[in-house]
Amino acid sequence: MEASKSSSTEVILEEWNGSSSTKLSRTATITASPSLSVQRSGGRFHHVWRRVLQAFVPEGFPNSVTPDYVPFQVWDSLQGLSTYIRTMLSTQALLSAIGVGEKSATVIGATFQWFLRDLTGMLGGILFTFYQGSNLDSNAKMWRLIADLMNDLGMLMDLVSPLFPSAFVFVVCLGSLSRSFTGVAGGATRAALTQHFALQSNAADISAKEGSQETLATMIGMALGMLLARITMGHALAIWFSFLSLTLFHIYANYKAVRCLVLTSLNPERSSILLQHFLETGQVLSPEKVSRMEHVLPAWTTSWSSKSAKQIHMQVHLGVRVSSLNHSELMDLLHSAGSHYKKAKYVLVEKQGIVHATLHKDSTSADVLQSFFHALVMANLTDKNKSVHLESQSWMDNHYEVFIQKLRSSGWKTERLLSPSIVWKAKWICEPLDAKMD
């Protein structure tokens, strides 16, 4: 009886396709009763489209990336497209200035000029990395935008180089120097943003698919650029109009791209915005709200339009070199280390509205974050004629842990502060005076 029941059971086998459980789609249904039958689901075009899409979006998309991935990639691809179109125009001008197509031009002369151009760019990249390499993580949005603005400047130098034949080498070297900043800043910030987008430890996959998107944009841009270069050849006004129009669009697209980003890491400016709002309301802002409030350009470019916004993070100097302080500041530092910060891994000294933070040589990333928030609290009290050390320490004792907990529950990463590298630290030892006299 059991054998007959088993033989009468109908088994249905379904085939599903997709890399994520939330995006699986049924492609076929197979049955064996009364005869073997295979019924395919969906059209062939739909299946082919899914396969093509897998070459350009990360596995598990859209659940494997953050919500700001798509708008950022759209604007980033558009700005990349405009860059490759303009590259054809600037390269055409550069080659004509070197002498390509002229009988009087020599191979060795053109080679030497190209060598100087590349050498300047290499040296510029090394110098830029030396001075700003550690600052790229903490201001990824700003440096991403600046990188593309420097690329615009470099391409402009290439385009104007034929107009200054006597200073040709100098002009193209300036352009190469400008683009070297783009290479360093753009590459470094791209890596930081890739880590931000990766929700499932899939940074490598995101980076690979971003490369596919960029390659596609490059091919389309090169084709359109060659067509535009052919149409505008010999028409200086048309070349300049096309170049400047595309440059304006490039700047706009880059601005929209970085404005789409909703970063959850803590850097000095985001920390300042969060703390000020918490001091005023007792609540923590979401990453989406903070992203709309933070600047994406250097502070000096926006200070004229945001005088009412108090940027207290500009009043904090983190990782101060002890030997650089004057006599009175050193005395304050020693007094604070022996009184207010005996158990802390940092010492704060306030002078003329500026808070200097000196980190202990054994300080951790959590200590750095705490020292910065403590310094922000102190900077906020400097214009209120209060005992800044006592008042700020009281706030830290009563509210800091609650503040950090609310940050975590709102989606902020509180493991560390993204700041320039702290290379100067100190060590202090507090001993009773009577023990020292003995």
Image (cartoon, helix red, strand yellow):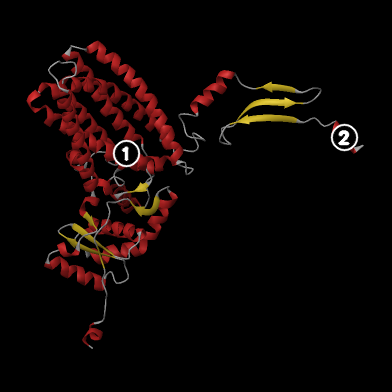
Is residue 62 visible in the rendered image? The answer is yes
Mark 1 residue crowding within 10 angstroms, few (<14) / some (14–19) / many (20+): few
Q: Residue at x 18, y 16 (%)?
A: 101
Q: Secondary structure at mark 2?
A: helix
State which mark lies toward you, 1 or 2: 1
Q: Secondary structure at mark 1?
A: helix
Q: Quadrant of the N terminus?
A: top right
Q: Residue 190: which quarter of the image?
A: top left
Q: Residue 310, can we see it?
A: no
Q: Position of residue 248 (x, y in %)?
A: 24, 25
Above/below status of 259 relative to 358: above
- The answer to whether 45 appears left or right of 124 in the picture is right
Q: Nearer the viewer, residue 415 or 242?
A: 242
Find disc 2 in the rendering and name its residue: 5
Residue with the mark numbered 1 = 187
The percent position of residue 363, horizontal first and vertical second, equals 33, 63
Residue type at the position of mark 1: Gly
Residue at left offset 46%, top offset 31%: 57
- Mark before the other along the chain sequence, 1 or 2: 2
Horizontal side of residue 82 vs 301, given as left or right: right
In this rendering, position of residue 213 left or right of residue 279: right
As rendered, which of 172 and 48 lies closer to the eye?
A: 172
Image position of 221 with respect to 386: above or below: above
